[in-house]
């Protein structure tokens, strides 16, 4: 998709005198390395040497990662975490989800280029030697989980004995999804913009202590009473929710069947992961959503209902902070968000529309068009500060390839010109502040086939290195396409 028609001043926010007017400041895992690429025609000697160099670089980067490492989102989600997890999983024994639910939408591709959209199953599932753990901090919708497993199995991906579900994880029922929609309707113009997957109501049940956990399915004699309490509570709260005895009977019967099928997956994952760590096995944690949607640190209340930042790793898996090592932050080369809430660098003009089309910015879970804008350095620095990232994965750099100029939102100021030193928690301030921009030259060339950093156009290298300089965290991975092999190791 060409972006050559983009003009930076087409958005009124960026016009002279507008609120966002630009400023121009003057050993490793014992498994052997496996090639991620599908078979391709023979290449020239120079390209072969370049490929060997890239493979060596990738081994060095991945091999140096800690025994317990993590991949977390830096922005408002949809950064491309699943792809990096899928690649790194070849060198880890366990990939674990620690929070969120089926509101996550991670797209990955196998070695033949086949696309898989995952929502609950960790993105390590395509690597046959990897065990996938759904931790205690996740809320689990069993019909959705089984549908996902069936889809994987029908496409030749074996899940038997490879997916473990925490007995402490809370269940997300169909009625939670219904309540989610009722809650959004109730909020009217102040709606959050959730995926309506029932995530918030499921976590609400957990926090008010009437939730039902996976382990409770082993005690079917008490399930009717627990479900009755949950459903009665929903009916008392929402007039639009019609609870009947027949609904309870049907739900109980359905979960009797689910319990039988789920039994082989149910595990004390806290013990399993800690025991694996003591055996020197390698664990990769996969975050869902992202830091700017964190229930504490995000743009509250326009956030998710869990902790997608570093703290959620320990509470969502039951591991000690002292064992958590390298965390990799995943950040797009621009910014997107889905749903309502502040978005300081949003481009409301044709530039935002063109970014959306070129980047195919439509939700994996909902299909909703994402709001698009420039990379927000203030938000990225805030995310890096909270999570202590050892390195970053800059994704979708190729989407910017046709731009004449690229903007970076480098600072916030109040309307009176007073600097805002960090990402604020005050929503009113977020809506009113002015963004100060730097403008960098574009590279105007296709970079999707580049596999070595030194082969990127100088302007693309300048963009990457300016981000590193502003944020203070090295970029070790650069995405230049959706496929497994479309990754540059820096």
Image (tube, helix red, strand yellow):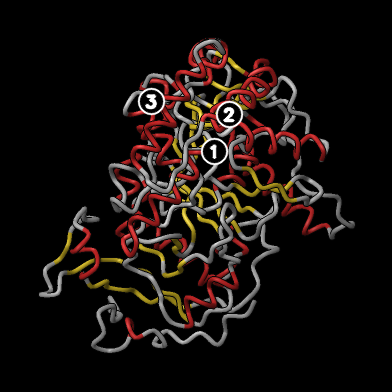
Tag nearer the camera, 3 or 2: 2
Q: Who is closer to the viewer here, 421 or 197?
A: 197
Q: Who is closer to the viewer here, 167 or 406?
A: 167
* Left or right: residue 471 compared with residue 219: left
Q: Quadrant of residue 21?
A: bottom left
Q: Position of residue 36 (x, y in %)?
A: 74, 44
Q: Who is closer to the viewer here, 233 or 112?
A: 233
Mark 1, secondary structure of its residue: helix
CA distance for labels 3 and 1: 25 Å
CA distance for labels 3 and 2: 30 Å
CA distance for labels 1 and 2: 9 Å
User: Crowding near pointer 3: few (<14 within 10 Å), some, many (20+)?
Assistant: some
**Residue that numbered label 2 is attached to:** 251
Residue occupying image coordinates x 57% and y 52%? 365
**Residue that numbered label 3 is attached to:** 315
Residue occupying image coordinates x 34% and y 39%? 388
* Left or right: residue 203 compared with residue 411: right
Residue occupying image coordinates x 63% and y 38%? 144
> Can you name the residue that lies furthest to the right here?
41
Mark 2, secondary structure of its residue: helix
**Residue that numbered label 1 is attached to:** 174
């Amino acid at each position: 998709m060409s972006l050559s028609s983009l003009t930076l001043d087409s958005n009124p926010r960026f016009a002279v005198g507008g609120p966002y007017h630009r400023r121009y400041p003057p050993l490793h895992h014992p498994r052997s390395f496996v090639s991620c690429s599908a078979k391709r025609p023979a290449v020239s000697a120079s390209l072969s040497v370049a490929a060997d160099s890239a493979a060596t670089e990738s081994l060095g980067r991945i091999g140096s990662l800690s025994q317990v490492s993590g991949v977390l989102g830096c922005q408002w989600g949809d950064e491309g975490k699943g792809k990096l997890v899928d690649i790194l999983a070849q060198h880890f024994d366990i990939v674990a989800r620690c929070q969120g639910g089926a509101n996550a939408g991670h797209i990955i591709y196998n070695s033949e280029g086949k696309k898989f959209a995952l929502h609950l199953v960790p993105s390590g599932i395509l690597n046959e030697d990897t065990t996938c753990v759904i931790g205690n901090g996740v809320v689990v919708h069993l019909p959705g989980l089984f549908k996902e497993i069936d889809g994987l199995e029908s496409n030749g991906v074996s899940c038997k004995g490879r997916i473990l579900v925490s007995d402490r994880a809370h269940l997300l029922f169909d009625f939670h999804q219904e309540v989610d929609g009722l809650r959004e309707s109730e909020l009217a113009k102040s709606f959050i913009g959730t995926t309506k997957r029932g995530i918030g109501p499921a976590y609400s049940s957990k926090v008010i202590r009437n939730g039902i956990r996976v382990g409770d399915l082993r005690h079917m004699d008490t399930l009717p009473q627990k479900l009755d309490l949950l459903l009665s509570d929903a009916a008392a709260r929402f007039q639009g929710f019609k609870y009947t005895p027949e609904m309870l009977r049907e739900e109980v019967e359905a979960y009797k069947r689910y319990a039988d099928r789920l039994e082989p997956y149910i595990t004390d994952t806290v013990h399993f992961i800690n025991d694996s760590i003591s055996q020197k096995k390698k664990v990769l944690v996969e975050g869902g959503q992202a830091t700017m949607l964190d229930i504490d640190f995000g743009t509250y209340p326009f956030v998710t209902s869990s902790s997608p930042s570093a703290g959620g790793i320990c509470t969502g898996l039951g591991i000690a902070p002292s064992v958590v090592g390298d965390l990799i932050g995943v950040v797009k080369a621009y910014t997107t968000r889905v749903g309502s809430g502040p978005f300081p660098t949003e481009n409301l003009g044709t530039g935002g529309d063109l970014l959306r089309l070129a980047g195919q910015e439509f939700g994996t879970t909902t299909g909703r068009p994402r709001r698009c804008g420039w990379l927000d350095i203030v938000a990225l620095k805030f995310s890096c500060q909270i999570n202590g990232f050892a390195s970053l994965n800059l994704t979708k750099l190729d989407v910017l390839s046709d731009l004449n100029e690229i903007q970076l939102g480098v600072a916030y100021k109040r309307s009176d010109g007073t600097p805002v030193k960090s990402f604020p928690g005050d929503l009113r301030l977020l809506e009113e502040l002015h963004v100060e921009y730097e403008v960098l030259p574009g590279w105007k060339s296709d970079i999707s086939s580049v596999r070595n950093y030194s082969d990127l156009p100088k302007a693309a290298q300048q963009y990457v290195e300016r981000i590193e300089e502003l944020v203070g965290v090295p970029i070790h991975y650069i995405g230049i396409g959706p496929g497994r092999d479309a990754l540059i190791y820096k």
